[in-house]
Image (cartoon, helix red, strand yellow):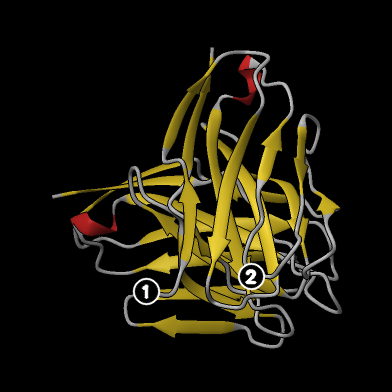
Amino acid sequence: IAGITQAPTSQILAAGRRMTLRCTQDMRHNAMYWYRQDLGLGLRLIHYSNTAGTTGKGEVPDGYSVSRANTDDFPLTLASAVPSQTSVYFCASSPGQGSYGYTFGSGTRLTVV
Amino acid sequence: GENVEQHPSTLSVQEGDSAVIKCTYSDSASNYFPWYKQELGKRPQLIIDIRSNVGEKKDQRIAVTLNKTAKHFSLHITETQPEDSAVYFCAASMSGGSNYKLTFGKGTLLTVNP
């Protein structure tokens, strides 16, 4: 089934630990994104990639890193987790090149304790 | 960068009534305005979008209007049903070249009371 897959679905993480959230799409979309969703704050862009091999910083990039080695995968890494990174993380993709609608993954609920 | 303001933050209507959610944006270069619906515990899903060369777009009970001069756009839901209850997000993008990033509003929690 074509779409975008995130893993894990949820995770409880000790502060200071390293964590990678996985995102894979099979739609051959050029652009991919990571957002965090917090109550009352909506969806805020962490990092994005317009095409394989390129990445950029969004609105709230501090404490996060990404890579885009190929078209399908866009992992998000928290190098040393802090409680303020407790959130729901959504990965999304879009075709780019004149078609801008996002397809979202099902989200990862991360709790940093 | 782009800033999107969304109002109201919560909206409660009776079944069958209309609901209107309004958004304003700051960057006059923005040219793509989608709306997403997010049910509790689910992912956001695109319900309708409009581009800057169009003033209004309809899809059954949902319509979106855009006023480029005033830099605001609105979502209209007619004949609301309980299954319309969700959080709705507006977004804006200055889509061109290699820039496809969306900036989202903070969301509106719509409750449709039976």
Depth check: give the residue in front, B87 or A16.
A16
Q: Which residue is mark 2?
A: B33
Q: Residue at x 62, y 67 (%)?
A: A72
Q: Is residue A66 left or right of residue B11?
A: right
Question: Amino acid type of disc 2?
Answer: Phe
Label 1 marks which chain's residue?
A
Horizontal and vertical percent position of residue A94 = 63, 71
Q: Which residue is mark 1?
A: A1
Residue A32, picture quadrant: bottom right
Horizontal and vertical percent position of residue B56 = 55, 83
Q: Which mark is residue B96?
A: none
Q: Residue at x 32, y 76 (%)?
A: B61
Question: Amino acid type of disc 1?
Answer: Ile
- On the question of residue A43 being in view, the answer is no
Q: Is residue A61 above or below residue B18?
A: above
Q: Is residue A51 above or below residue B13?
A: below
SS at mark 1 in the image = loop
Depth check: give the residue in front, B1 or A67.
A67
Q: Is residue A66 above or below residue A86?
A: below
Kindly indicate whether the residues beneath marks 1 and 2 are on one polypeptide chain.
no
Residue A44, picture quadrant: top right
Depth check: give the residue in front, A1 or A50.
A1
SS at mark 2 in the image = strand
Horizontal and vertical percent position of residue B4 = 70, 52
Q: Residue at x 80, y 56 (%)?
A: B26
Horizontal and vertical percent position of residue B57 = 51, 83
Answer few, some or many: residues within 10 Å of disc 2's Cα (few below 14, many 20 plus, some between 14 and 19): many
**Camera-side mark, 1 or 2:** 1
Label 2 marks which chain's residue?
B
